[in-house]
Each structure stands twice: as structure tokens, then as C-alpha cells.
Image (cartoon, grey):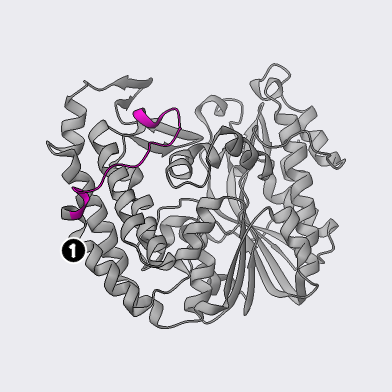
Amino acid sequence: MIGIGERLDGDLLAPARPDLAGLVHWGGGAARPIHRWFRYREGFSPALIAALGLGRRILDPFCGAGSIMVGAAQQGRASVGIDVNPLAVFVARVKLSPLGGSDVAAATAFLDGFEAAAGGVAAGPTPALRIAAKVFEPRVLDAVLRLRTLIEQRAATPELRNFLLLAWLSVLQPVGSYFKEGNGIKYRNRQRRKGGYVPRPDGRWQLDRFGADQEAFVWAAFRAKLAEMLADVPAWGDGNWNGQRVIDGDSLDRLGRFGAGSFDSVIFSPPYVNRFDYVESQKVELWFGGFVDGYDAMLALRKRSLRSHLGAALERPVLSLPEVEDLIARMDPASYALRSRVPALLRGYFSDMADILRHCRRVLDAGGRCFVVVGNSAYGGVIIPTDALIARLGLAAGFEAASVVPVRHLTVAPQQRTELRGREGSMRESVVILS
């Protein structure tokens, strides 16, 4: 019997492109100058621009830390990026803003003297993030906050301040007692073992990770990052850096401000419909970087985001999409998914995607193409063929042709392996091509 996933695939499925697998995530550009300044795991490799044959004017409505935009600048193209996450917007803008010679000299001088100078400044206030004392050891926290104070005091220009602040933000996780994993953060005082996490002996794990001098550990991490960024400064020497624009805001709102035919290509990877809340996983950087100043601001940021997680504004109106309702009706009635508002999540997500695709069709020039990188998911024993649904929403939005190009297999969650046995092939990451 043909399942709903296969039925939705229909004649949309194109030959797989495993050569693209290394380009549709941040690892594909992780070692490249400028791209490597901040680890943003949801990014692209800039090589995707040539691999997909993007045009001269590119729009990325979920630009993240600006991988496509940096690539566009390096290749002499123009681009516009939009993102609702203020941390991502900040990172993208710094990477796209070449420093003048005097600021480069000042950053070099800062690198040479920050350790001696940091001893003479007081630590700034600890952000009101409730887990601040859990994500940093006390001596690490003191060093981190003194370094932030020194940056604010010594940076003579906004451009220099932002460059130094990006280096500082980039080392928060490496010097912290936390790391990003899945739908949030985990703590380094616990070790993953078969069957779950077990505590590490207090005192021992800190010594193993930080060494005997935690302040020196922080200084070494910051020194290495800032030196890396300064070594990449010559990469700003060529390219169209003035032709890139980063917009802070919600794509559903901002896309409506562009005229018809403004772009040759649109490329984006929206948050997948997997309940991952990236505000949650990035909350340390958001709080410590000053991008949010309270829990109300965190809540507002969640509510502004695409309806891909349970903290989004699921109460907003939705479209009536029969394919989505069919998927929901097939879910196991006893599953956690049905008890945790996943049906509302799916309705909101695909309604948002339909709106975005209508805007993308309008802002593309005649002959322009839209590329959507997305992964499928599963709830209640049902695979959600997000790629095929987006392709069909694209056709409904006015695109004349659509294809789904699988690029790599996605791992099935352990709790779903039995229910999905025999259908694992539909758990994939794909590039949806609309023209």
C-alpha cells in the first residue's frame, strides 16, 4: 500500500544529490576565513552558491549568521538576508563589515595587551539569566565579564567594538560549562553514557577541562579566536562587501516590503518542523551579549519566530491544508505528539511556509528560482514529508515547476525506530527547487 509520504512525493522526487550533503550545513564552511568566526550550526557552505547556480541578486529570508551573504560578497554578487534572531543578525553584520586600517591596528594592539589590562578592570554585572551560575564556573565568569568591560572601555569605534565583541561571544561556549545539543543546552558536569547522563565528580571535571588556572583558560581561548579573526582580515580585500544588506526582523513581515522582480534567486533553510527552539539553545549568547534583557524579551522573540517549535505563536490563524490534516489524522492517538500541541505546530508551520513562498514567488525576477533546504520529521508514527509539502505549497504559490532533491539521510529518533521501520528512506534532508 502506498503511504501518504509516497503519495505526496508523487512525481516530485528527483535523483539524489549526495554531493550537496556537505554544503547544506555549517560544517561545509567551518574552516573558511570569516565563516569560521562564529559557530552557527544552522548555516550553509558558501560553495552552495555555485553548486546551485544562484544569480547575481540573492535573497536569504532565514540568513542566520550570513553564510550565503559572505559567499555572495566574496563572489561579487549582491544579497539581502533577513533573520528574526538578533544574535544571528549581529554576527552576519560583523562578518560583512570590513574594518578600516586604524581599527585593525587597534584590534591588534588589544590582542597584545588585553591580559595585562584586564587585571585593572572590574567585572560588569552578571546578566539576570537564571542559569548564569551553572553555565560558567565562578572564576571563568569573572574573567568573561572583565573582558567584556575592557572591550567596552577600549574600543574607540562601534566597528572595532563589534569586531572584538564577536570574538568574545564566540568563546562563551568553549570556556563555559555548557554546550548546545538538540533542543537546548547540556552541562559539562554530566557525561553521556548508554542509558542517559551520569554526574562527573565535582572538582575533577573542572580540572580536566580548564586546568589549574581558569582565568588563563579564558585568556587563551579569546586570544586564539581574536588572532584567527585578525588573520582573516585580508579576506575582506576582494569582493562586493558594500552590496550586502542584513535586515533584523520577521520574514513574514519583511518580505512584503520588496518589490516584484527584486531578486534572481532565493535560497533559505527555515527551521525544521522538529520542535527545536533556537532561542533556547542560544540563550547564553543572547543574554550575555545584551540581545535580550529579560524573560519577557525572550518570550517575545519566541513568539516572533516561525511556528516550528511549541513556544511560537501557535494561536495565530492558519490555512486549511488538507494534506496536513490527513497527516495529523494518521498519528497514533496515544502518542505524546498529540498531547503536546504538535497538530497546532504543523498547521502553523505550513501556513507560515505558504505565506513565505507566495512572497518568494513575487519578489523573484522572471526565470528566477527558489531553493529551500529542509529536513523531514516524524510524529506519532507518521513521517512528515516536509520537503514534498513545501514543493506542493510552492506550486500553489504560483511556481510553475517543483522538484525534491534528496541530499542526505536523517537518523530516526530511537523512540520512533520500531514504528517507522521500513520507511526510514523518507527521513531525509532535501533541496526543494521551485521555478
Q: Amino acid at mark 1?
A: Asp
Residue 132 in magenta?
yes
Instruction: Identify the secondary structure beneath mark 1.
Output: helix
Majority secondary structure of the magenta segment? loop
Above-or-below relation of 349 to 92: above
In this picture, which residue range is highlighted in magenta? 117-133
Between 423 and 263, the one nearer to me in the picture: 263
Residue bearing mark 1: 112
Q: Nearer the viewer, residue 250 or 5?
A: 250
- Confirm whether residue 391 shows in the render: no
* Residue at horizontal 18 percent and vertical 60 percent from the top: 113
Asked if the magenta segment contains residue 177, the reply would be: no
The vertical placement of 356 against 67, above or below, is above
Residue placed at 43% from the left, 60% from the top? 28
Left or right of 168 on screen, residue 216:
left
| Location of the C terminus (image quadrant) | bottom right
Extreme residue toward the top, this view = 334
Judge by depth and name the residue closer to the eye, 408 or 234.
Answer: 234
Residue 334 seen in this snapshot: yes
Left or right, 160 with reference to 63: left
- Vertical relation: 104 (above or below) 2: below
